[in-house]
Image (spheres, rainbow, N blue to C red):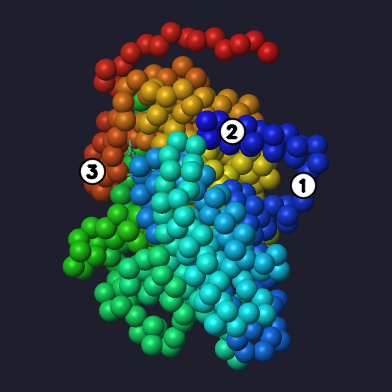
Amino acid sequence: MAALENLANQVTLALRNSAVHRDLTVLAEVDNLTGLANRAAFNAALSRDLEGVADRETTVLFVDLDDFKYVNDAYGHHAGDELLQVVAARLREVTRPSDLCARIGGDEFAVLLRRTGEAASAEIAQRVVEAVSAPAALEDAVVHVGASVGVASVVGGDDAETLVHRADVAMYSAKAQGKARVQVFEAGLLRGDPTRVAFERDLATAAANGQLVVHYQPVVTLDDGRCAAVEALVRWQHPERGLLAPDEFIGVAERIGAIGSIGAAVLRQAVADVARWRDSLPGPGLSVHVNVSALQLDDDAFTIAVAECLREFDWPADRLVLEFTETVVISSPAAIGRLRGLSASGVQIAIDDFGTGYASLTTLRSLPVQIVKIDKSFISGSTTNVEDRAVTEGISTMVTRMGLRAIAEGVERPEQRDLLMSIGVHEAQGFLYLSPQPAAELLAWLTDHHAATDEPDAYTVIPFIPRRAL
Ligand code: C2E
Ligand code: CA
Ligand code: CA
C-alpha cells in the first residue's frame, strides 16, 4: 500500500506542479521523503550560522540509524521509507523549532542546535537516541532500530565541513562502542579505529593504484534479446580482502571524498573498453552506462572529465549514459546546473533505482532525464504481488507517455520478462540475461548477442493485453 500511496503522491505532486511550477530552489532544499532539510540546505544553514558565533554555541548532531539495512532487507524499502519518515518526525519532536533537522544521506540525519553548548547538546542527543529507539509501528510491521549519535560543538573558526566531519567521527565511535549511544567529539577520536583508518586510506588511493576493476552488465532489448548497451559496475580489488562489491565501499568513498577519483577512473575505463570493442563488433553502436554519485556534481571536475574522455576515445556523447540516483534531486542548484550542462553536451541522463521513494515525477519534469530505470525491488515482486505490479506498470506508463525510455532492472525470471513486455517495457537488465562480468567475458558474450537477433532461450509469446481506452 505504501508504494501505491507513494506513487499516488508523486502523481499528485506532478499535477500540482504542472499548475504551479514550484520554484526549483525550494525543491532543492527539501528532502522529498521526509520533508526535512537536505544535505545542501543543512550545510548552507550551518555555514551561515558559523559566521560570528562564539565558541561552543553551535552544535551539530550526526545521527545514524543502527540496523536500518535490516529493516529494508526484511520488510522491503516501503517499510524503510516509512521508518525514515517516523524518525524524521521524532527528531522534530525532541528538538526545538529553532533547530534545523536534516536528512543528509540514506539513513543519516543531522541536527543543527543553535545557541546550545556541548553539555546541553549531549542531553538532546540522548533524547534523540531514546526517541528513535522506541518501537515504530509501520503499516506491515513493528520494527525496532537504534540510533548512534555524534556530537560536535564549534571551536574557534571551524567551518561547516569540519564540524560535520567531527560529528561524523564521533558518531562512528559511538557505533563502534555498541550502538544506541552518544559520543561527544574529542580530538583523540581522529586517530580512530586502525582497521577503519587503513581501509579508508587504501580506498583513497585505490584508483591511483589501479585497484579498481570494472565489470559490465548488458542492457537487453526485450523484443529480440539483443544487447543495446552495457552498464559499468565497479569492484575494488582490495589487497587483502579480495574483490569487494560497490556496496562495501562506495558509501565510504562518498564520505571520505574519494568518490571523485573513483568515479573518474570508472568513467575512463568504461569508455576505453567500449571504444576498444567497437572495432570487433559489427552492427549498431553500443551505449555505455556509468553510475555517477550526486557528490560528483559538487564541482566541475566530473563535467571536465566527461568532455575529455569523449574526446580522447572519440566516443559519441549520445552513447554515454550517466546514471544518477534520485539524490541528485536533493542537491544544490549548482549541481543541477552541471547536470543540465552535461545533458546539453549530448550525454544521456538516466535516473537509477526509480520509485524507491526519494524521486518524484517532479524529478522527471525538472531535470534533463531521458531514461528511467525501474528499481529491481518492484520487478522482483511484479509477478507475485499486486502492488509491485501496479507500481511497475504505473512507472512504465508514465515514463513512456512522457516520451522517456524505461529500463527494468533485476529481471531474473522469464515470467517477469513476459509481464514487462505485456506492459510495454522494452529494455531490461538482470541475471536472466547475464550477471555483471569482467570485460573479457562480456566481450565474448557480446559477440553472440550484439548484432544477433536471436530470441532469448525459453522465449514465450505473450498475448497482447489491451489497455483501457482513454
Ligand atoms: P545499480 O546501479 O542499481 O546496479 C545494479 C546492481 O544490481 C548491481 O549490483 C548488479 O549486480 C545487481 N543486479 C543486476 N542484475 C540483477 C538481478 O537480476 N537480480 C539482482 N538481485 N541483482 C541484480 P552491484 O554491481 O553490486 O552494484 C551495486 C550498486 O553500486 C549499483 O547499483 C550502483 O548504485 C553502485 N555502483 C556500482 N558501480 C558504481 C560506480 O562506478 N560509481 C558509483 N557512484 N556507484 C556505483
Ligand atoms: Ca545503475
Ligand atoms: Ca539501480
Q: Position of residue 244 (x, y in %)?
A: 27, 58
The relative height of residue 356 versus residue 105 in the rendered view (above or below) is above
Depth order, front residue of 322/194: 194
Amino acid type of the residue tagged 3 in the rendering: Glu
Q: Which mark is residue 69?
A: none
Q: Quadrant of the C terminus?
A: top right
What element does badge 1 sit on? loop
Q: Give the CA separation, mark 3 to mark 1.
A: 48 Å
Circle 1: is it few (<14), some (14-19), or many (20+) Cα within 10 Å? few
Q: Quadrant of residue 44?
A: bottom right
Q: Is any atom of residue 453 visible in this view?
A: no
Q: Give the CA separation, mark 3 to mark 2.
A: 42 Å
At 70% across and 65% down in the image, what residue appears? 97
Residue at which label 3 appears: 441
What element does badge 2 sit on? helix
Task: Choose mark 3 or mark 1, whichever is in front.
Answer: 1
Circle 2: is it few (<14), some (14-19), or many (20+) Cα within 10 Å? few
What element does badge 3 sit on? helix
Q: Residues at badges 1 and 2 in contact (C-beta under 8 Å)?
A: no
Which comes before the other along the chain, label 1 or label 2? 2
Which comes before the other along the chain, label 3 or label 2? 2
Q: Position of residue 308 (x, y in %)?
A: 50, 61
At 38% across and 31% down in the image, what residue appears? 380
Q: Give the CA separation, mark 1 to mark 2.
A: 22 Å
Which comes before the other along the chain, label 3 or label 1? 1
Q: Which mark is residue 22?
A: 1
Q: Position of residue 371 (x, y in %)?
A: 54, 38
Amino acid type of the residue tagged 2 in the rendering: Glu
**Residue sitting farthest toward the right:** 20
Q: Quadrant of residue 191?
A: bottom left
Residue at which label 2 appears: 5
Q: Residues at badges 3 and 1 in contact (C-beta under 8 Å)?
A: no
